Every structure is written in C-alpha cells, then in structure tokens.
Image (cartoon, rainbow, N blue to C red):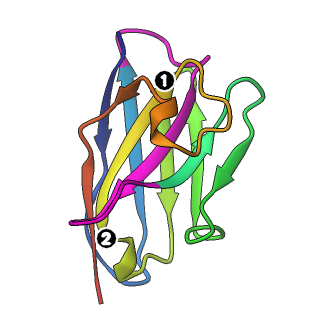
C-alpha cells in the first residue's frame, strides 16, 4: 500500500506562487507514474500535470502550461508542483496520485493511490 500526503496549499494573491509537495510512504514510488489533479467546488476532477515512469517525461494541462512545473525527488519519495503566476481560476483542491500501471496519465482511473488533497485559494 502507498499513502500519499499533500502539503503546501494556502491562500495567495493573484500573481503569487506556491509549491505543493506530495510525500509518499509505505512503498517507494520511484517506479510509479505520478500526477496532480485538481477539483473545484461543483466541478469534475481535472488533470493538471504528470511525471511518468519510466523515462521521467512530463506533461502539463494547457491551462497551466508555462506557469506550473511538476517534478519529483526519488531520494525523498516526494513529488512537487511549483505554481507561479497563480490566477483565481486555479482555486481548487489539489490532489496527488500514483499509478503503477499508468501509461499516459491523463485520466484519474489510471491511478491506484490518491492523497486527501490540499486547498489552494487564489484571491483577485
């Protein structure tokens, strides 16, 4: 079993930055594809970014491309999301996910494990 715990969310003004962390425990996730999704109230869970295994390739949703960057530190069993140039429309609960068999990583049903989420609120 893998446990995922997100941290780093908070309240920030538009244009500001936050760095989210997703710490994994129970098993090393270095051979898992990992991703960030977000869910705003009353809306569906949306893909934000993915970092794949093997190879380490990344991809970001068009809405965050150029502003957000996904990365991972396998020595710490942790994944990150650096968020710059935040906008009010980025307000959501951000969830991290890990999947042992995920291929492209764009859809939530590719992932076996999920964290509880961290709230990000961007004020205008």
Image quarter for residue 92? Answer: bottom left
For label 2, the SS is loop
Q: Is residue 6 left or right of residue 85?
A: left
Q: Is residue 109 above or below residue 59?
A: above
Range shown magenta: 25-46
Image position, residue 91 (x, y; %): 31, 70
Residue at image point 58% right, 45% down: 106
- Residue positioned most to the bottom: 124
Where residue 39 sits: x, y (%)?
A: 32, 58
Q: Report whether residue 46 is seen.
A: yes
The question of residue 31 being in magenta is answered with yes
Quadrant for the C terminus in the image: bottom left
Label 2: how many Cα within 10 Å (few below 14, some 14–19, many 20+): many
Q: Which circle marks residue 91 in the picture?
A: 2
Name which residue lies at 57% across and 22% down: 32
Is residue 105 within the magenta segment? no
Neighbours of disc 1 within 10 Å: few (<14), some (14-19), many (20+): few
Residue 93 located left or right of residue 81: left
Question: In this figure, which residue is indicated by the disc labeled 1?
Answer: 76
Name the quarter where the N terminus is drawn.
top left
């Amino acid at each position: 079993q893998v446990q995922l715990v997100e941290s780093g969310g908070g309240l920030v003004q538009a244009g500001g930055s936050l760095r989210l962390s997703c710490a994994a425990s129970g098993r090393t996730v270095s051979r898992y594809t990992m991703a960030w999704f977000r869910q705003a109230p009353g809306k569906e869970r949306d893909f934000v970014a993915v970092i794949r295994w093997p190879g380490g390739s990344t991809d970001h949703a068009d809405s965050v491309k150029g502003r957000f960057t996904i990365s991972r530190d396998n020595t710490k069993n942790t994944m990150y999301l650096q968020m710059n140039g935040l906008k009010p429309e980025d307000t959501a609960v951000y969830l991290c996910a890990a999947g042992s068999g995920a291929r492209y990583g764009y859809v939530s049903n590719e992932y076996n494990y999920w964290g509880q989420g961290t709230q990000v609120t961007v004020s205008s």
